Amino acid sequence: MGEISLKGLKFKAYHGYYDEERQLGNTFEVDITIKTDFYKAAINDELAGTVDYEKLYAIIKDEMATPSKLLEHVVQKIVDRVLQEIHAVQSVKVELSKFNPPIGGECDRAVVSLVKER
C-alpha cells in the first residue's frame, strides 16, 4: 500500500457562513492524500496501475466550485466522491484551509480535515 498526495491546490471559492463570504469569495488551499496499491504501476510504468492525479484534481475542483456554508461540508463531499468514483482508493485524507477567516481577530487560516477509509 502506498500514498499519493497533492499538496497546495489553490482555489478562489465562495464558501462561508456569511452572505458576504459567499459573494466576495476567498482563497482556499486543499491538500489530499490517498492510500492505494500502486505496485503494478511501479513495476510496469503505466498509469492503469495507479490513481490518476488529474481525476483527483477534477473532483476537488468541482466541489470547490460549488458554494457551501461550512468547510466541514466541503471536505465531506470531496472524501465521499473520491471513495465513490475511484475504487482503487483505500483511504483518503482531505485538508481544507480558508485564508483570513472572518473571526473578529487576526488569523492566517482556518483548517478542517477529514480522514475516511473504505
Image (cartoon, rainbow, N blue to C red):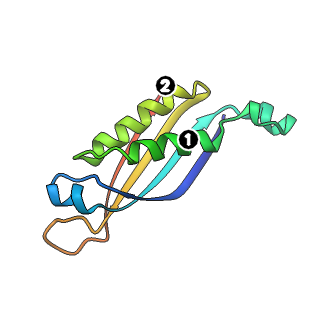
Q: Nearer the viewer, residue 31 or 91?
A: 31
Image coords of residue 95 (percent x, y): 41, 50
Nearest to N terminus: mark 2 or mark 1: 1
Q: Is residue 7 above or below residue 36?
A: below
Residue type pointed to by label 2: Gln
Q: Residue furthest front?
A: 23
Residue at 47% across / 44% down in the picture? 60
Residue beneath label 2, please? 84
Residue 104 % position (x, y)? 13, 70
Q: Residues within 10 Å of mark 1 (few under 14, many from 20)?
A: many
> How many marks on residues?
2
Say which residue appears at 28% left-offset and 52% top-offset: 15
Judge left or right: residue 10 versus residue 109. right
The percent coordinates of residue 41 (x first, y second) are: 79, 35
In depth, the one of 24 and 39 nearer the eye is 24
**Quarter-wise, where is residue 48 in the image?**
top right
* Quadrant position of residue 45: top right
For label 2, count other residues whose C-alpha is less than 10 Å away and answer few (under 14), some (14-19) or many (20+).
Answer: few
Quarter the N terminus occupies = top right
Q: Nearer the viewer, residue 112 or 99?
A: 99
Please give the residue where the numbered disc 1 appears in the rendered image.
56
Q: In which quarter of the view is residue 20 placed?
A: bottom left
Check disc 2 and report its element: helix, strand or loop.
Answer: helix
In front of the other: 15 or 95: 15
Which residue appears at 38% of the width and 52% of the height?
96
Q: Amino acid at mark 1?
A: Leu
Give the SS element for disc 1: helix
